[in-house]
Image (cartoon, rainbow, N blue to C red):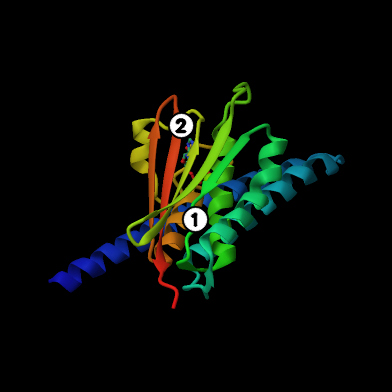
Amino acid sequence: YDNLLLYKQQMESVSHLAAGFAHELRNPLSVIRGFIQLSALTDDIEKYYKTILSELDRMNDIIDDFLSLSRKAPEREAQQPYEFFQSIVSLIRSECLLRNIKLVHDFQRVSAQLLLNRSMIKQVFLNVLRNAIEAFDDNQTDKRFSLKGRVVDKYYVITVEDNGPGMEREVLDQLGKPFFTTKEKGTGIGLPLCKKIIQEHNGHFEISSELGSGTTIKISLPLEQTL
Ligand code: ADP
Ligand code: MG
């Protein structure tokens, strides 16, 4: 009975995923179809090219994101948390500077190490930063993105905070469902992917948000004792 229930749940989540994927691809497909039809009615096809190409690129992005959702467990290497997260900071510094976002960071030094796939963890932080950037109101003048790393029990806990608009209860409740997005051009795969990557590292990924004051993401990664 237990197995049957599990099987049913798995089938449900697979069909949910497949339905979402198909739905996401249909939108750009129908735009492309429409533009090709329109372009047949005119000599001026060039002006339709741009949209067609950008919709094709979008389909490609959706497929890339979808594939990384199902990629198998990545290879990992031992990393010093302090050094590794400093490299994350340098990765995102210019992006923040460019967008007038104050970047605050404070990582605790620790001798224990983390077992990480560097590029996947980088992808997590880039996704989280991209979401913050997309959430900020252009008119906000005191934009801030902060990263803090602390040892808590056997975990290295990174708290990522933005002081953007935060999320409504209804949005917060839907987070983590693949393809849930509030953006016209969103894929809704960013956060589910982050969560999956962190879980594959035996860690935890938690989101909290306060409407009007910002969003906080807590990422906990298990520390390995050094010999
Ligand atoms: P996408 O960015 O493609 O919409 P995500 O899974 O990355 O997909 O995010 C899902 C939704 O969560 C976003 O559409 C947005 O509504 C909300 N969200 C995520 N991060 C933030 C944030 N830092 N501030 C406000 N809302 C956010
Ligand atoms: Mg996103």
> Which disc number belongs to residue 131?
none
Q: Is mark 1 within 8 Å of ligand 1?
A: no
Residue type, mark 1 in image: Ala
Closest to the observer, 206 or 226: 226
- Which residue: 30% across, 65% down? 10
Q: Which residue is mark 1?
A: 22
- Which residue: 64% across, 44% down? 31
Residue contact at pointers 2 and 1, CB within 8 angstroms: no
Quarter assignment of residue 86 = bottom right
Closest to the observer, 34 or 66: 66
Q: Which residue is mark 2?
A: 214
Farthest bottom residue in view: 227
Mark yes or no: residue 174 visible. yes
Where 29 sits versus 196, above or below? Answer: above
- The image position of residue 196, as x and y in percent, is 43, 60
Where 143 sits versus 49, above or below? Answer: above
Label 2 vs 1, first from the N-terminus: 1
Closest to the observer, 214 or 186: 214
- Which residue: 38% across, 66% down? 202
Mark yes or no: residue 184 visible. no
Label 1: how many residues lie within 10 Å, few (<14), some (14-19) or many (20+)?
A: few
54 left or right of 78 in image: right
Label 2: how many residues lie within 10 Å, few (<14), some (14-19) or many (20+)?
A: many
Quarter assignment of residue 1 = bottom left
124 left or right of 47 in image: left
- The image position of residue 106, as x and y in percent, is 53, 45
Residue type, mark 2 in image: Gly
- Tag 2 secondary structure: strand
Where 117 sits versus 175, above or below? Answer: below
25 left or right of 52 in image: left
- The label nearer to you, 2 versus 1, is 2
- The image position of residue 107, as x and y in percent, is 52, 50
